[in-house]
Image: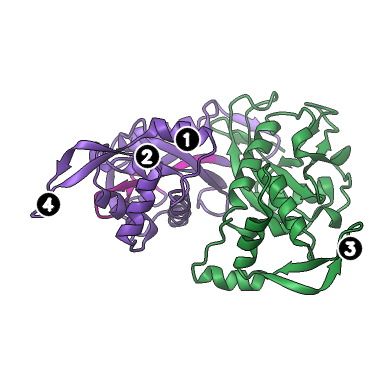
Chain colours: A green, B purple
């Protein structure tokens, strides 16, 4: 069957920048392309949008098909529409970004992708298409957004120490943060619940574990509270 | 001539939320649709993307064709892809928002649009398609962005008083601001250049005029300066 239109139409894809954090580094999940163009090259998970599905649904479907990831934090990022970004024909890509607790997921190759692997954001291989631009745009968005929305917690395990939280922010913002100021600020929001548990790391004294109070944040947000780091 | 593809393809449009400020109210520029669907209804300026032009170019072209606007501040906002957002068929719209100095432009109807007019953002007529959602998304983006980027100056005349600047922020943020705090903050950045001119408004004493130092902002920004209100 074929489909005919009066004017030429662009093809439409979605691509996903999946960020993970392994307690020291911010990482991006890439797949190795099984097909041309760019066969064998690393690329973002993604693919063509079906004509009867939303962009969000398409991004989630492709993510599951290519990496096995499900039920993740996912937001639309930007639509990339340079005229020659795909060697085949005019293809637009509605880019999304996702945040996952890296430990929860073993990156696994699925149907379309030959291989899926985490790479440090600072040491990505050469990427197919304009995917390096898409990653850069996603990183800028993440760096901006963690400063005024507590989305960083999507990248942490449910129980974390203040050091882990600080390392996460340092990894995302690519800068060292003052320990005292950072703790004062994040604890000042009243959104971190101390748990009756500690964590031993090496020979250090046990560190207090916390969880993020998402319900309280929702309530505060409704009242106009701003999370600002 | 017709164009045939193996799989069905969505049509692609751009739409523009044009914000203006008339010294008291934040406004949006709407056009009255000359054609079905929604003939006679108010809508955002926009139209179909040509297969060989970028999204940015398409948005600027449609804006000029429908409103006469040229060389404005314009950024991509979000891509709206609900499956039934257009009664004709699957149509995706890459929404943009623009900021203009309202005084510089007489909204003028052009080729495709029957009529173009400014409406207060708080009193918009019923809009065609999902354009009310697009305006709401653009307003949220503007409210977020003016707090960390000095884009508000795009909406002001080149010379302005501190009262005008405060009124602009109050109109965008939909809230009253404390005069002393506001002035301390905006003057603290060192980005407002006092001019050798004053402005008389009614019987008040003459108010100092300022201009925004865009060059200095660019330099500061390179060094990692954050504009935060």
Q: CA distance from mark 3 to mark 4?
A: 67 Å
Q: Secondary structure at mark 3?
A: loop
Provide the residue designation for mark 3. Answer: A200
Residue drawn at x 62%, y 73% is A216
Does the magenta run of residues contain B85?
no
Q: Residue furthest right?
A: A202
Q: Which residues are magenta?
A: B12-36
Tag 1 near tag 4, CB within 8 Å: no
Tag 1 near tag 2, CB within 8 Å: yes
Residue drawn at x 27%, y 44% is B115
Q: What chain does mark 3 sit on?
A: A
Q: Secondary structure at mark 1?
A: helix
Provide the residue designation for mark 2. Answer: B191
Main SS of the magenta segment? strand
Tag 2 near tag 3, CB within 8 Å: no
Q: Quadrant of the N terminus of chain B?
A: top right
Q: CA distance from mark 1 to mark 3?
A: 43 Å
Q: Determine if marks 1 and 4 fall on one subunit.
A: yes
Disc ID at residue B220: 1
- Say left or right for B129 vs A161: left
Q: Secondary structure at mark 2?
A: loop
Disc ID at residue B12: none
Q: Residues within 10 Å of mark 1 (few under 14, many from 20)?
A: some
């Amino acid at each position: 069957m074929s489909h005919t239109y009066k004017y030429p139409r662009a093809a439409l894809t979605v691509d996903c920048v999946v960020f993970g954090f392994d307690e020291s580094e911010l990482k991006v999940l890439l797949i190795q392309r099984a097909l041309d163009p760019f066969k064998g090259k690393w690329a973002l998970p993604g693919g063509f949008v079906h004509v009867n599905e939303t962009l969000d649904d398409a991004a989630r479907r492709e993510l599951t098909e290519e990496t096995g990831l499900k039920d993740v934090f996912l937001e639309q990022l930007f639509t990339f529409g340079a005229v020659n970004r795909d060697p085949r024909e005019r293809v637009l890509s509605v880019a999304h970004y996702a945040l996952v607790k890296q430990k929860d997921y073993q990156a696994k190759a699925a149907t379309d992708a030959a291989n899926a692997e985490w790479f440090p954001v600072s040491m990505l291989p050469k990427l197919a298409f304009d995917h390096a631009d898409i990653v850069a745009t996603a990183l800028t968005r993440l760096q901006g957004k963690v400063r005024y929305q507590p989305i960083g917690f999507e990248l942490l395990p449910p129980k974390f120490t203040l050091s882990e939280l600080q390392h996460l922010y340092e990894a995302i913002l690519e800068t060292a943060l003052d320990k005292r100021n950072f703790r004062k600020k994040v604890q000042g929001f009243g959104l971190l619940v101390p748990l009756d548990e500690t964590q031993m790391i090496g020979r250090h004294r046990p560190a207090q574990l916390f969880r993020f109070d998402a319900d309280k944040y929702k309530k505060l947000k409704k009242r106009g509270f701003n999370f600002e780091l």
